């Protein structure tokens, strides 16, 4: 359950979004000519994967191109993606980022970006890079896949799955219960999969959701940038400070060393909720820039933490910008 302050912030954020929607884009740009619009995508698929379908939306190649074209009408791609280049960029440029290192961001989105001359930063979850020993997948992918497989199953099978979940306290609708399973109870997905005759390991090995180390190296060769996105994508607000710092520094060191990068970028999984000043004190010497999706209301470390506009579910880039781009000083309204 969210706290009252979370609820107030959520309401305030909703109101601000509605208000910002009515502000012409040009006004936001003139108020804050020093704020670079940064976009975040995950997957680009002709048909959403079953393990993503119940988690978030994604663009088709056609709609991805369309939103890029809309953005290109208003902004030029930022070419200098160095820490100073990003930190000093203004509202006449834009930056594209991809989180999670999904295979479609490499296979589908990258050729489109290259054709249009748009650079991008890919943020990788280091334990999930494919093709390495012990590599894993996001646990919530299993929930989405199992929800998809439950469609068309008999009432008996749904009941059996419900019984497995409710034994550990996950009650209510079976889809919602599957999605609510916490990381420490993730073995429940194996139990449910067994009941439904789904071999999760074989499925994810065959489909391979994430890029490999070699594919990430290929992105660098082709002029794209890489950053870290934690070791295994936890919710930072559920971790203590030591674990937050450990996830951050281990993943940043992994990416910078494995790909010999002269810069160190980190994108928070989900968002930087639960982050205290001590976190930035303990990581600042090893991270050049941080990226998040909740710049609103968070004034901490404003010179190094960059807010991004979520684009996965947005058919209209300019409308998304008007709602989600919170240029300083608009981001200070609380
Ligand atoms: Zn992520």
Image: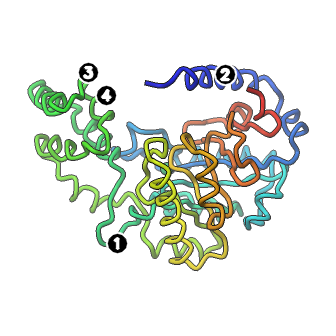
User: What is the CA distance from the residue labelled 1 to the residue labelled 2?
Assistant: 44 Å
Q: Quadrant of residue 26?
A: top right
User: What is the CA distance from the residue labelled 2 to the residue labelled 4?
Assistant: 27 Å
Q: Give the residue at x 86% y 41%.
A: 32
Q: Earlier in the sequence, mark 3 or mark 1?
A: 1
Q: Secondary structure at mark 2?
A: helix
Task: Name the spot of residue 223 as percent of width and height, x first.
Answer: 65, 72
Q: Quadrant of residue 74?
A: top right
Q: Secondary structure at mark 1?
A: loop
Asked if residue 319 is positioned above or below residue 189 in the image, the reply reads above
Asked if residue 268 is positioned above or below residue 317 in the image, the reply reads below
Task: Name the spot of residue 164 as percent of width and height, x first.
Answer: 14, 33
Q: Which mark is residue 176?
A: 4
Verify CB contact (< 8 Å) between mark 3 and mark 4.
yes
Disc 1 designates what residue?
A: 132
Q: Secondary structure at mark 4?
A: helix
Disc 2 designates what residue?
A: 12
User: What is the CA distance from the residue labelled 2 to the residue labelled 3?
Assistant: 30 Å
Disc 3 designates what residue?
A: 172
Q: Earlier in the sequence, mark 1 or mark 2?
A: 2
Q: Quadrant of residue 66?
A: top right
Q: Earlier in the sequence, mark 2 or mark 3?
A: 2
């Amino acid at each position: 359950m969210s706290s009252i302050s979370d609820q107030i912030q959520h309401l305030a954020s909703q109101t601000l979004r509605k208000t910002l929607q009515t502000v012409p884009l040009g006004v936001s740009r003139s108020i804050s000519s020093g704020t670079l619009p940064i976009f975040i995508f995950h997957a680009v698929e002709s048909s959403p994967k079953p393990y993503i379908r119940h988690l978030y939306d994604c663009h088709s190649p056609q709609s991805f191109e369309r939103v890029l074209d809309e953005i290109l009408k208003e902004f030029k791609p930022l070419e200098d993606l160095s820490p100073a280049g990003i930190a000093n960029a203004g509202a006449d440029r834009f930056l594209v980022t991809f989180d999670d290192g999904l295979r479609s961001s490499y296979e589908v989105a990258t050729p489109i970006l290259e054709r249009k001359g748009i650079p991008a930063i890919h943020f990788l979850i280091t334990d999930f890079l494919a093709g390495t020993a012990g590599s894993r997948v996001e646990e919530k992918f299993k929930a989405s896949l199992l929800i998809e497989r439950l469609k068309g199953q008999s009432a008996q099978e749904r009941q059996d799955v419900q019984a497995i979940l409710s034994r550990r306290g996950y009650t209510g609708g079976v889809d919602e219960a599957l999605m609510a399973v916490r990381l420490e109870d993730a073995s429940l997905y194996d139990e449910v999969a067994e009941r439904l005759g789904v071999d999760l390991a074989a499925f994810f090995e065959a489909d391979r959701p994430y890029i490999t180390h070699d594919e990430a190296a290929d992105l660098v060769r082709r002029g794209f940038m890489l950053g870290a996105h934690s070791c295994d994508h936890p919710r930072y607000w559920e971790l203590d400070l030591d674990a937050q710092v450990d996830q951050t520094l281990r993943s940043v060191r992994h990416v910078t060393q494995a790909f010999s990068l002269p810069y160190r970028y980190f994108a928070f999984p989900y968002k930087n909720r639960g982050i205290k000043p001590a976190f930035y004190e303990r990581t600042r010497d090893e991270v050049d820039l941080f990226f998040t999706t909740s710049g609103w209301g968070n004034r901490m470390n404003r010179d190094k933490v960059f807010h991004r506009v979520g684009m996965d579910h947005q058919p209209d880039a300019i409308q998304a910008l008007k709602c989600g781009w919170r240029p300083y000083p608009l981001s200070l309204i609380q």
